[in-house]
Amino acid sequence: MVSIELTPTLAHCIETTARHEFSKAANQYMQRGEGDEELEEKIELLRAFLESMDFKELRRRSEKHLIEGKTVRFILYLEDGKPRCEMKVGK
């Protein structure tokens, strides 16, 4: 099972961070060509995440911690074929 860790900042919200990671993975895939199953799974997870998450709610939950200077990480994964994410807050 593939999981992805995204770390938003005050300058780049979780949606922008996910879009950047999706673009980066898609570019890598285009350069390498077919056959990289892990990269394909990563792209699919990011696509599903971008299409289905409530980014307004994720920003609301994470920004208060970012304003306090804390590190926020979102761990993305698939559960029963649906994208899920956990938010972890560090110092």
Image (spheres, rainbow, N blue to C red):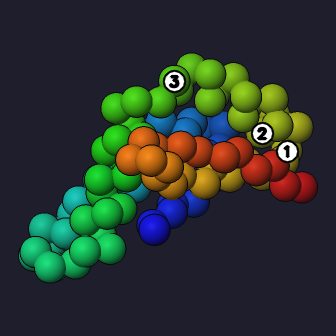
The residue labelled by disc 1 is 69
> Where in the figure is residue 29, as x and y percent of width and height?
19, 69
Mark 3–mark 2 Cα distance, whole angstroms, equals 18 Å
Instruction: Name the secondary structure under disc 1.
Output: loop
Q: Residue at x 48, y 36 (%)?
A: 15
In this rendering, would 70 be left or right of 7? Answer: right
The part of the image, by quadrant, that contains residue 90 is: bottom right
| Circle 3: residue type | Asp
> Where in the figure is residue 38, as x and y percent of width and height?
32, 74
Disc count in the image?
3
Q: Quadrant of the C terminus?
A: bottom right
Residues at discs 1 and 2 in contact (Cβ within 8 Å): yes
> Where in the figure is residue 6, as x and y percent of width and height?
56, 54
- Where residue 66 is drawn, which disc sits there? 2
- Could you tell me if residue 18 is visible in this image? no
In this rendering, would 39 be left or right of 66? Answer: left
Q: Residue at x 14, y 79 (%)?
A: 35
Q: Residue at x 39, y 47 (%)?
A: 81
N-terminal label among 3 and 2 = 3
**Up/down of 10 relative to 24, above or below:** above
- Could you tell me if residue 15 is visible in this image? yes
> Where in the figure is residue 1, as x and y percent of width and height?
45, 68
Foreground residue, 8 or 3?
3
Toward the front, the furthest residue is 80
In this rendering, would 87 be left or right of 31? Answer: right
The residue labelled by disc 3 is 54
